[in-house]
């Protein structure tokens, strides 16, 4: 008997019924109630409740560039913002569903059921320090919940001033919801029969409304479009605000999530030279009934104290702890040592020409990643003669550690991409003891100054002096590397505003990135290389007026090229040689076009090249998994004449991209269309919003991700047509 799949029919019938309710009746009832209330008010004096007035942070502001909190118009960097309304309308559950709205971002080893990673401007983000909540570092090896997030911000490019040792890709920053009066219930499902429920509760308390709380909770029963890849997720968060006095504010955030879902392995090139075909988006490669879902348990906590000395000077002290624990008991598809056609290759880390692959019993439980951070910043405004200064100085300490068992990765049999594999016995193996594998720390002094020169010019100067100390151990507990480095990471920009609504800028930045880790098949397996430098130049123009923001940016970034270099004897050596040189242009538009039409669109054209690597086959063509052109558009249209109804639509385009470093295998480009609707009405006295979305409307089969992970190339299919339906009640 097939598994029970809850039907969309109940919510569909509810939607049809709500759409059939005459809006006029609700309006007349509301008008009658208002008139009665007005008559009563004229007859009887009443004592009104205290009103708590709060200033809300504008969605067009950010401090990600490292020059303090500023409007995006006055920020000399390219920053994308996805707000709460967009997250809700898209019914996004994971970060990949959010970031596809930004053309500069692409997937980079983001399997279904596992934590995701991304490339920005052609460089991979770093799980150690590229992901943030409220500006503070978190362990990136987790699937961050979106229920308690107000915004997702994307800083594109170098972030040395903001984050220290990091990749030149940029930062992903989540802003959490703050305290306010809210009572919301969300229920949802999809065409696979998933079940979703979330609550959002908040209010202010105390005689002067000085205490605020915001609680978010969610449960998701995941029914995947991939066979055998169902799962579930539970989430709980608390945000607390205490206005101690007019000068002092204390904020606390904690969020906990436990997610369990089978991880979906990626495909590999057939014979190392051919894109797999035919393939099914529903087949789980290497399925074995004894394999378990991947469990990821994450905890993120933050405490922030803000004190305002006067109108010009303020201070902020912050502390954060983030922990992610991964339990991985998977059956994994990799390589073709067991296939006859692969026998002549020393390292056949691909599928055979006939579609055969090796099946492994992989076990790595209790894999623990921790990030801890303490930061103190003092900011103020002052003048020196005709120059106005906005100065920020501070100290920052970030510690990162990894503890894990020596994992099991044992061959158990062979499968084929065209059929489900037979059932094999689990390997008879034992885990090595759990040990600390990495311990790193960053101690930093940082400063930035925004210098206003007259009414039109601003000079922005910043630097971070970072001391990086990192130790790495092998699975036997032996110290393999101890790296110490102290570097100054400068950043500078010049901004010109010919008028209030227009800004032009040019900037330069230097970054420091952690060294890569050699693949297991390299002659120097598991070696972690020394940190590398990166450099970025950028110029851009921004325009904001009447709710519409336009932007254009040109960038040029270089970083040391890290890769497994082929040797004459068929082996590999992992090294740093040459550079990965990416240049491109980004265009963006976000805001209201007309009274009822809102548009969010972006285009990114990137030329990504490996240079001076010592391996000619890797040069002279576009880099792995980076299309030359990517575009995205999302639109919301408030339908005139039908109160509460909005139509939603969008499309994402990606050009073709190479699936191997040699540039000899290419996957085609694709365009995916999305369609949806939002309808706001009332059920009785309860404001109710219904949302319907259909992703990949044409049910297109495409390769969304052909990137690399730990030295191996993987290919991941995009999701098929997916319909989601949700109803939101605001009590």
Image (cartoon, helix red, strand yellow):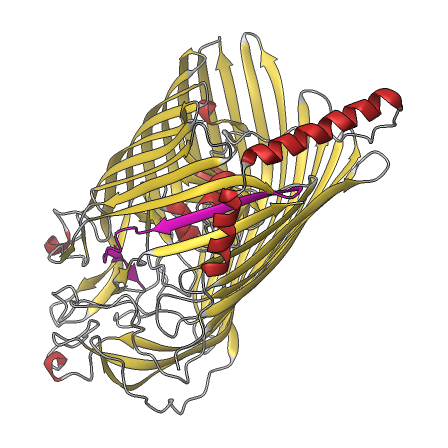
Quarter occupied by the N terminus? bottom left
Q: Is residue 247 visible?
A: yes
Quarter occupied by the C terminus? top right
For the record, the magenta segment spans 683-709
Camera-nearest residue between 565 and 720: 720
| Residue for point 13% across, 47% down | 621
**601 up-or-down from 199: above or below:** above
| Residue for point 12% across, 77% down | 354
| Residue for point 45% across, 88% down | 430
Q: In the rendered view, does 449 fall on the left or right side of 544?
A: right
Indicate whether residue 443 is drawn in magenta.
Answer: no
Residue 250 drawn at (x, y percent): 73, 40
Residue 480 drawn at (x, y percent): 42, 68
**387 up-or-down from 305: above or below:** above
**78 up-or-down from 385: above or below:** below
Indicate whether residue 705 is drawn in magenta.
Answer: yes
């Amino acid at each position: 008997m097939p598994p029970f799949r809850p039907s969309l029919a109940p919510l569909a019938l509810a939607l049809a019924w709500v759409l059939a309710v005459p809006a006029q009746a609700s309006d007349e009832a509301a008008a009658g109630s208002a008139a009665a209330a007005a008559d009563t008010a004229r007859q009887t004096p009443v004592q009104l409740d205290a009103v708590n007035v709060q200033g809300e942070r504008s969605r067009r502001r950010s401090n990600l560039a490292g020059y303090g909190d500023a409007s995006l118009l006055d920020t000399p960097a390219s920053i994308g913002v996805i707000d709460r309304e967009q997250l809700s309308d898209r019914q996004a559950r994971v970060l990949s569903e959010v970031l596809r709205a930004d053309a500069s971002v692409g997937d980079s080893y983001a399997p279904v059921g596992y934590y995701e990673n991304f490339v920005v401007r052609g460089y991979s983000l770093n799980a150690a320090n590229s992901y943030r909540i409220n500006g503070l570092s978190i362990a990136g090896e987790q699937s961050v919940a979106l229920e308690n997030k107000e915004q997702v911000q994307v800083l594109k490019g170098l972030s040395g001033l903001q984050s220290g040792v990091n990749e030149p890709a940029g930062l992903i920053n989540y802003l959490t919801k703050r305290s306010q009066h809210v009572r919301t219930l969300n229920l949802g499902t999809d065409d696979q029969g998933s079940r979703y429920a979330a609550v959002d509760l908040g209010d202010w308390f105390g005689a002067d409304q000085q205490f605020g709380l915001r609680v978010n909770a969610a449960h998701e029963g995941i029914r995947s479009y991939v066979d055998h890849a169902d799962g579930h997720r539970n989430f709980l968060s608390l945000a607390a605000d205490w206005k101690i006095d007019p000068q002092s504010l204390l904020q606390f955030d904690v969020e906990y999530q436990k997610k369990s879902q089978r991880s979906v392995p990626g495909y590999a090139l057939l014979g190392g030279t051919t894109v797999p075909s035919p393939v099914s988006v529903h087949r789980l490669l290497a399925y074995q009934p004894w394999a378990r879902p991947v469990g990821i348990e994450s905890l993120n906590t933050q405490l922030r104290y803000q004190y305002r000395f006067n109108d010009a000077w303020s201070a902020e002290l912050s502390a954060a702890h983030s922990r992610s624990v991964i339990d991985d008991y998977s059956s994994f598809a990799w390589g073709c040592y067991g296939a006859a056609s692969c026998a002549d290759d020393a390292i056949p880390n691909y599928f055979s020409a006939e579609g055969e692959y090796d099946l492994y019993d992989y076990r790595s439980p209790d894999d623990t990643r921790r990030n801890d951070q303490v930061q103190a910043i003092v900011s103020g405004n002052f003048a020196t003669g005709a120059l106005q200064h906005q100065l920020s100085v501070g100290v920052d300490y970030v510690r990162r550690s990894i503890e894990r068992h020596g994992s099991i990765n044992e061959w158990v049999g062979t499968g084929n991409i065209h059929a489900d594999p037979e059932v094999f016995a689990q390997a008879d193996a034992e885990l090595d003891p759990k040990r600390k594998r990495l311990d790193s720390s960053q101690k930093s002094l940082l400063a930035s100054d925004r210098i206003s020169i007259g009414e039109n010019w601003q000079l922005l100067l910043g630097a971070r002096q970072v001391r990086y100390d990192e130790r790495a151990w092998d699975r036997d507990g032996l110290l393999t590397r101890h790296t110490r480095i102290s570097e100054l990471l400068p950043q500078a920009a010049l901004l010109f505003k010919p008028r209030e609504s227009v800004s032009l800028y040019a900037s330069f930045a230097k970054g420091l990135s952690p060294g890569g880790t050699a693949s297991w098949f390299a002659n120097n397996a598991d070696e972690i290389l020394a940190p590398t430098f990166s450099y970025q130049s950028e110029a851009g123009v921004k325009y904001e007026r009447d709710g519409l923001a336009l932007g254009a940016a040109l960038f040029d970034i270089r970083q040391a090229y890290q890769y497994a270099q082929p040797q004459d004897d068929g082996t590999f050596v992992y090294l740093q040689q040459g550079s990965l040189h990416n240049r491109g242009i980004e265009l963006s538009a976000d805001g209201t076009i007309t009274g009822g039409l809102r548009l969010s669109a972006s285009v990114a054209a990137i030329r990504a090249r490996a240079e001076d690597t010592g391996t000619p086959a890797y040069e002279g063509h576009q880099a792995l998994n980076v299309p030359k052109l990517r575009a995205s558009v999302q639109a919301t249209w408030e339908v005139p004449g039908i109160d509460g109804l909005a139509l939603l639509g969008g499309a994402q385009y990606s050009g073709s991209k190479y699936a191997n470093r040699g540039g000899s295998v290419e996957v085609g480009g694709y365009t995916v269309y999305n369609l949806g609707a939002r309808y706001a009405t009332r059920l009785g006295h309860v404001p109710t919003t219904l949302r319907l979305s259909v992703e990949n409307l044409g049910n297109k089969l495409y390769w969304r991700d052909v990137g690399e992970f730990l030295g191996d190339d993987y290919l991941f299919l995009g999701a098929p047509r997916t319909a989601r339906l949700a109803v939101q009640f605001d009590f």
